[in-house]
Image: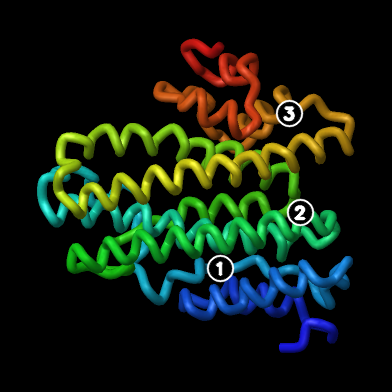
Amino acid sequence: MGYNTPMNFYHTIETALQSHDIDTKERLCADLLKYCSTNETVSQPQKPALLFDTPSYAPLCMIVHPRELPARKHFDTTEGLATLVHAVTHIEFSAIDLALDAVYRFPAMPQRFKLDWLVVAEDEIRHFRMLHGILEALGYSYGDLPVHQGLFDASMHTAGDVLDRMAVIPRHYEAGGLDVNPQIVKKLLNQAKNPTVAAIIEALNTIEQEEITHVRKGDYWFRWLCEQRGLEPAETFKEILSRYALHRHKPHMNIPARKAAGFACEELLSLGARECD
């Protein structure tokens, strides 16, 4: 593809979003990022963004209600480890589409917004591949176990307002991932001499550090939008969480990671943190 010629940017994102093939997503994401990096502006889409009925991974995975998912326990067994790694692999696959969808659905946002989320999409593709390699070493593949579509549903529910999207996806769900990650690693540490478990721990630690930058980008754009609209960020965030019936209390809040991602102690305490300094 020639990058000095017009590219149907939004059609390409739409194709990437609807594809269940990770190679296609990776190739198209690289095309999109290169085009966006070498052109000062991206022309507006020729048609409104689609509201998708099903997530891109539907051809690969059996989608069930969260209550029907296998429990993540028995990490001393291959099956237990595979259940854990498959769940995190699914989150990373979902996160690829969440990042692409932010670019696709909100074309009026600045060029930096598009670049930020295309970079995030590339990171999530790398995370997916890293985890999928571990999953294959355990004798499994993505799609072998059932999944839920909670993140996809959240993206469609917030399709009408980029402020809601930045609040719900990066600042709520992805920040929640920062809270959960250390808890998982803690449960695995007593088996760290197992090479596969050591690889899982290393992958989770890498992902946590890189996800901090993703949440920070969401925090930046959330605050930027609040400033544009004359809104107070902390109260606006709580109002959005309440409107979407999302719980604020985080019993195991990862304070250092959330602070690094842009949250202030005052807000963290109001969201349920026991202490923050």
Percent from the top left, x then y, of residue 142?
Answer: 32, 68
Bin the neighbour count of mark 3 within 10 Å (Cα to Cα): few under 14, some 14-19, many 20 and up: some
Between the C-alphas of marks 2 and 3, the distance is 20 Å
Find residue 53 and name its label.
Answer: 1
Bin the neighbour count of mark 2 within 10 Å (Cα to Cα): few under 14, some 14-19, many 20 and up: some
Which type of secondary structure does the marked residue at label 1 adopt?
A: loop
Q: Earlier in the sequence, mark 3 or mark 1?
A: 1
Q: Earlier in the sequence, mark 1 or mark 2?
A: 1
Between the C-alphas of marks 3 and 1, the distance is 29 Å
Q: Are marks 2 and 3 in contact (CB under 8 Å)?
A: no
Q: Left or right of 244: which side holds 56?
A: left
Query: Where is 234 relative to 74, above or below?
Result: above
Q: Residue furthest left?
A: 77
The residue carrying mark 2 is: 113
What residue is drawn where x is 43% and y is 71%?
A: 58
Query: Where is 9 relative to 199, above or below?
Result: below
Residue type at the position of mark 2: Phe
Which type of secondary structure does the marked residue at label 3 adopt?
A: helix
What residue is drawn where x is 41% and y is 21%?
A: 251
Indicate the quadrant containing the N terminus: top left, top right, bottom left or bottom right.
bottom right
Residue type at the position of mark 3: Thr
The residue carrying mark 3 is: 236
What residue is drawn where x is 72% and y is 79%?
A: 11
Percent from the top left, x then y, of residue 127?
Answer: 44, 58
Bin the neighbour count of mark 1 within 10 Å (Cα to Cα): few under 14, some 14-19, many 20 and up: few
What residue is drawn where x is 77% and y is 69%?
A: 36
Residue type at the position of mark 1: Asp
